[in-house]
Amino acid sequence: MARVEKLEPGAADGTGKRLRVLFRTRLPYGVGFDVRMTRVRPPSELEAQSTGELEGTGRWTLSPAGGGTLVRYYWDVRTTRRWMNVLAPVARPVFSWNHDELMREGGQSLARRLGADLALPDAPSRQHGLVRAIRWVVAGAALAAVAVLGWRRRPWPR
């Protein structure tokens, strides 16, 4: 995460609090959006609405698990950046890899800040995900080139 700026304090329980968030990613772009807390139910639930380059809803749930706390984050958003939406059909694997890396790094950073161990159930290997993403991008680029340049049909010899 590159920056978080507090825009509005909200109510005493945090409802209505607004933040501006800027993420830097592994790929050469950042994503910025505003978050407004819409529901605060200590100690088990937070919900927020995002606007800007990501629009939608995020919800965090916290529950006891194995002597610790299980944190689940539900993120139902869409990007508003035109170039991302245009490239999504062929670049989705790379965007997914980039998102997974950002979330993994965020989880590790939060765990360090809390002095806790981070356990990621069923997390795919980083290398495997990157290789798969690169393969999809190459395949997508080839298909895009074929679509743009068109097939050159050679007439059959008579």
Image: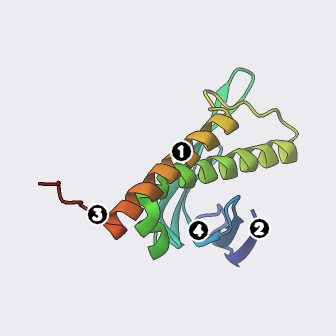
Q: N-terminal of the two: label 4 or label 3?
A: 4
Which is more toward the observer, 42 or 59? Answer: 59
Dot 4 or dot 1, earlier in sequence: 4
Q: Residues within 10 Å of mark 1 (few under 14, many from 20)?
A: some
Say which mark, if any, is on residue 152. Answer: 3
Q: Quadrant of residue 43?
A: top right
Q: Position of residue 127 (x, y in %)?
A: 68, 37
- The residue wearing badge 2 is 2
| Residue at the limit of the structure toward the bottom, as seen here | 7
Along the line of sight, which residue is nearer the eye, 139 or 46?
A: 139
Q: Which residue is mark 4?
A: 35
Kindly report the distance in space between the C-alpha atoms of the residues bearing marks 1 and 2: 29 Å
Residue at figure coordinates x 63%, y 32% from the top left: 123
Q: Earlier in the sequence, mark 2 or mark 4?
A: 2
How far is the residue under mark 3 from the one under mark 1?
25 Å
Quick one: 42 or 65, which is closer to the camera? 65
State whether residue 62 appears in this view. Answer: no
Nearer the observer: mark 3 or 2; the answer is 3
* Mark 1 / mark 2, whichever is N-terminal: 2
Q: CA distance from mark 4 to mark 1?
A: 34 Å
Give amino acid for label 3.
Answer: Arg
Residue 117 vs residue 53: left or right?
A: right
Specify the amino acid type for callout 2.
Answer: Ala
Instruction: Find numbered disc 3 in the image and state the secondary structure of the residue it sits on.
Output: loop
- Mark 1 sits on what residue? 135
